[in-house]
Image: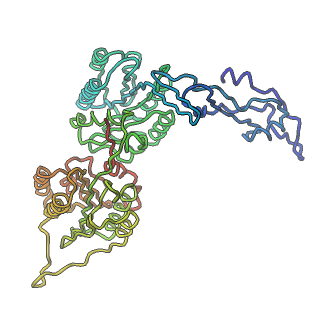
Amino acid sequence: MTPDDRNNQPNAKPTKEEPNGVNSCHDVCNWSSWGPWSDCTISCGGGGLQQRQRRLCCLKECGGFERCATQCHIEDANYVQERVCGEVCLNSGTLNRDSYYRAVHLVLRTSYLYLILLSVKQKNNSIAQLEFVTKFVEKVNISTDEFQIAVITYSTEEKLEITFNQSVSKSVLQSLIQNIRFRPGATFTNRGLKSAMEVARKSERRKGMVTLTYAFVLTDGMSNNRKETRIAARELRNAEVHVVVIGIGKQVSHQELVDIASPGDEFSPSYVFSVGDFNALDTLLKQLVQVTCDDCKSVSHLSDIVFLLDEGNEMTEVEFQISLDVMTSIVQRTGHINEQNGQRVGLVRLGNTLKREIEFSRNLSQSNLILAIQTLFRQPAVLCEKDEQCTVKNITSAVNKTIDHFFNLNGRSNARKFLIILSNGKFENAEIVREEMIKIKELSDFKVFVIGPGSDVNMNGLLSLAKEANHVYIVLENDDTSKLDIIQSEFSYNVCK
């Protein structure tokens, strides 16, 4: 209870009774906690106002002030507080007024608090993460009024290794990082998140500055307590901490990454990143610094996206329908389809023939594109001369032809390029597929995601198509497809100065 709460606590007892003789409120009417302060009505220059409110709780019920106050005979109780705000324009901010309008230009310095959570249950992975943190420190200006970093490690137990108060220079930080040791155990991500919550709660905001707090969560496996991890992540986000999650390796849960991370916003379309191994962390450094900067003025949606639906290899009707639902879900979550400089979507179907179902040039709207996908039927077998079935050599031949047509001939040179393969992975020789896919990727600039529809897929076959194991997804019948937001988030990306 704050001093304000104590000063304004009513001391009232019930006098009214309900017709049945039961008291209509508790022996003492208690106030709820104060709510958060509202935004200031102006940015700077003085005269702004903020408000916060609380409710009066009687008989285990929180209701409007007038009803409860009347029942408990409370007079002049303080249930709304106001305070003056926006008094000063700081750090070269100016306030301009003339007889026609009042314009406010506010320039506040921004400071950053970075909480870095490391999974240290495996020695090799722990060393790679510490190297990543060291390089991360080199990318930002460590000081008490710009960037400060705290480090938390977690396995079976969590530990605050470096506090914000120790983050005074790069040299000091790097020395402290070298002293962090791995601790074998389980993956209790929830404990690391709870520790981050405590650190964030105790951190001091710098006077005259806007302070932004980010938590970078590195994980190489599924949490041992997924429910508690979701709860701890939600509490951290509710405390105005931007949560960036980095899943590493094929043992992570894509759904859990989405559950932990903050949703995308005007600064970054996504705060979820996924890499194949710890060695790939270096490629994320620039992007991670970008998503935390407030100079990110624009978001690019320039992406060419092609679905390759592999209906061969005895794909069942259930697998086919799951594939349609997956494509529909991805399209629904992609917000700038066929806008100028937006995303374009194509679709190729591989049965015993290769058919380009949807071309980039058709310029279907998002709703019509969804309709075109949802109304697809299984392809009938097509016969060639002498009643022999027309066959494509294998999945890699289909990939080659798709890449050549959509990306090499009709792709936009400055667009990101994505191939999303939907297949059960039941190839005759997955190792040959793997070798051929490596050669294809060496000659083309595109990213592959692989989605296995249903529980009866061949993982070796699916992994042979993808460059990294974390780009392989399994979607079961009636499964929640929000895990695919990690794919969709690649289609829109921030552009920083």
Query: Which residue is at a point 39% across and 39% down the rendered structure image?
Result: 267
Task: Residue 18 in the image: state x and y as whole percent.
Answer: 87, 44
- Pick the front one: 14 or 496: 496
As rendered, which of 188 and 238 lies closer to the eye?
A: 238
Give how far across and how far down residue 303 sits, in percent: 28, 53
Image position of 100 (left or right of 127): right
Q: Residue at x 35, y 57 (%)?
A: 339
Residue 22 visible? The answer is: yes
Residue that protrudes farthest toward the front in the picture: 99
Where residue 420 appears, as percent x and y from the top left, is: 26, 57
Query: In the image, is residue 54 above or below residue 484?
Result: above
Question: To which quarter of the image does residue 70 belong?
Answer: top right
Placement of 360 over or under 286, stated as above or below: below
Asked if residue 271 can be seen in this view, the reply is: no
Q: Quadrant of the N terminus?
A: top right
Front one among 347 and 156? 347
